[in-house]
Image (cartoon, grey):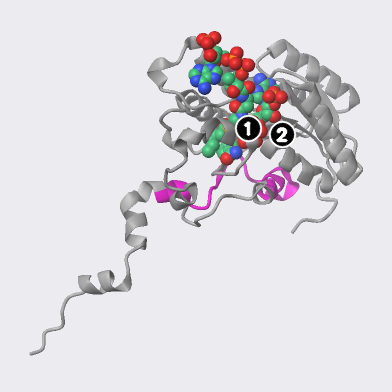
């Protein structure tokens, strides 16, 4: 689908790029010629991922242990990154989430999520934006969102609130930073199985529920490659006129939800049920 050198010369930071979707997107970026930088809190995870990139693609990537909740640590990481050259793309992917009843959440639990997802994304974005504007460098921020940013979501309220804030951030900055040639875009993934998300959001207590696929119009989960392709397009120069937009890639999940359970039920009706609803032809 893409030229093999599509991202050649682009220097890209993926926060939380050591695991899950961030790692899959990073693999795609490197395969298309990008110079990749990843960060996360766990050194061993980052090092194992860097080794995987070396083994599978023969590529050396940069890794930084950095907690994006710590603004000073973010600034120090960006200083080190910039010593080797400016970033062209920031991908805000790092996130935290878990299932909980909101009235039982401690303030520390609320902060843990909001600090990673909202503040962490903001600290990274503000830092790179400051550097890009000061040097006249054009760049792109790609924010990973969730459906809950648009619709809200029970039992993951801090995440929904934080992602909604991140959506507001990319829409606001699209206008504020547009004149500098900085684009701010987002993606809204539906269900893409990862260890990090599934271990926290799909506990064994949920076994026996209707399968997730039933709530997706296309009746399947997403494949990492599909998300990586969209994330490639959005940061490429081909998408140079897109800004402030969050692209939904969810197999029609949120629209299936909006249609309600009865839509799914009606899709199971046999022909005879539909036939019985037709007006009877009068014999006269
Ligand atoms: C209630 C919880 C909790 C839970 C933690 N806490 N887990 N409260 N229910 N399940 C509380 C703790 O008791 C503590 O509060 C506070 O949160 C901080 O907990 P720590 O363990 O000290 O936090 P920390 O080590 O910073 O870890 C952050 C974390 C953790 C978010 C809690 O899960 C994490 O590191 N997650 C990163 C990866 C991740 O979540 N990936 C999934 C992204 S999926 P007290 O008051 O007791 O001190 C995603 C998908 C979206 O976003 C949509 C999918 C369809
Ligand atoms: P994941 O593997 O758990 O990814 C989260 C990453 O963020 C981890 O690598 C984690 O590494 C890093 N991280 C967490 N807190 C951090 C912090 N404070 N500082 C720096 N890094 C931190 O889960 P995933 O499913 O791939 O999620 C990736 C993104 O996709 C998230 O934004 C998520 O909201 C979004 N998303 C996922 C789905 C899905 O179905 N999987 C759906 C919609 C949206 P460390 O723990 O080592 O720090």
- In the displayed structure image, the side of residue 113 where residue 141 appears, left or right: right
Q: How crowded is mark 2: few (under 14 residues within 10 Å), some or many (20 or more)?
A: many
Residue at mark 1: C-beta within 8 A of ligand 2? yes
Q: Judging from the image, what secondary structure is the residue with disc 1 in?
A: helix
Task: Give the distance between the C-alpha atoms of the residues marked 2 and 1, in whole angstroms.
Answer: 8 Å
- In the displayed structure image, the side of residue 231 where residue 43 appears, left or right: right
Residue at mark 2: C-beta within 8 A of ligand 2? yes
Any part of residue 118 in sight: yes
Dot 2 and dot 1 residues touching (CB under 8 Å): yes
Where residue 115 sits in the image (x, y, percent)?
58, 17
Q: Quadrant of residue 132?
A: top right
Q: Is residue 227 above or below residue 130?
A: below
Q: Is residue 170 above or below residue 241?
A: above
Q: Judging from the image, what secondary structure is the residue with disc 2 in?
A: loop
- In the displayed structure image, the side of residue 46 where residue 258 appears, left or right: left
Q: Residues within 10 Å of mark 1 (few under 14, many from 20)?
A: some
Q: In which quarter of the image is ligand 2?
A: top right
Q: In which quarter of the image is residue 71?
A: top right
Where residue 253 sits in the image (x, y, percent)?
47, 48
Q: As rendered, which of 152 and 233 lies closer to the eye?
A: 152
Q: Which residue is drawn at 82% across and 18% down?
A: 79
Q: Residue at x 59, y 44 (%)?
A: 192
Q: Earlier in the sequence, mark 2 or mark 1?
A: 2
Q: Residue at x 46, y 37 (%)?
A: 206
Q: Residue under label 1, please give it.
A: 196
**Image disc number at residue 235:** none
Where residue 60 sits in the image (x, y, percent)?
90, 36
Q: Residue under label 2, please give it.
A: 19
Location of the N terminus by quadrant is bottom right
Location of the C terminus by quadrant is bottom left
- In the displayed structure image, the side of residue 37 where residue 234 appears, left or right: left
The magenta stretch spans which residues? 228-256
């Amino acid at each position: 689908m893409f030229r093999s050198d599509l991202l050649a010369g682009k220097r890209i930071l993926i926060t939380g790029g050591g695991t899950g979707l961030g790692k899959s997107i990073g693999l795609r970026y490197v395969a298309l010629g990008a110079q990749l930088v990843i960060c996360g809190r766990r050194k061993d995870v980052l090092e194992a991922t860097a080794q995987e990139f070396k083994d599978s693609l023969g590529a050396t990537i940069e890794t930084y242990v950095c907690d994006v909740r710590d603004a000073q640590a973010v600034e120090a990481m960006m200083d080190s990154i910039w010593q080797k050259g400016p970033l062209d793309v920031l991908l805000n992917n790092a996130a935290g989430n878990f299932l909980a009843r909101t009235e039982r959440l401690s303030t520390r639990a609320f902060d843990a999520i909001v600090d990673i997802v909202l503040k962490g994304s903001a600290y990274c974005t503000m830092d790179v934006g400051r550097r890009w504007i000061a040097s006249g460098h054009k760049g792109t921020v790609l924010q990973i969102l969730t459906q809950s940013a648009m619709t809200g979501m029970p039992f993951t309220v801090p995440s929904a609130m934080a992602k909604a804030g991140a959506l507001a951030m990319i829409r606001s900055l699209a206008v504020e930073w547009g004149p500098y040639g900085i684009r701010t875009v987002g993606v809204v993934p539906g269900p893409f199985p990862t260890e990090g998300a599934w271990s926290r959001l799909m506990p064994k207590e949920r076994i026996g529920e209707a399968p997730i696929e039933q709530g997706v119009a296309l009746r399947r989960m997403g494949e990492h490659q599909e998300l990586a392709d969209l994330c490639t397009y959005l940061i490429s120069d081909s998408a140079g006129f897109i800004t402030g937009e969050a692209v939904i890639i969810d197999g029609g999940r949120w629209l299936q939800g909006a249609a309600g359970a009865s839509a799914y039920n009606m899709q199971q009706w046999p022909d005879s049920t539909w036939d019985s609803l037709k007006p009877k032809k009068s014999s006269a």
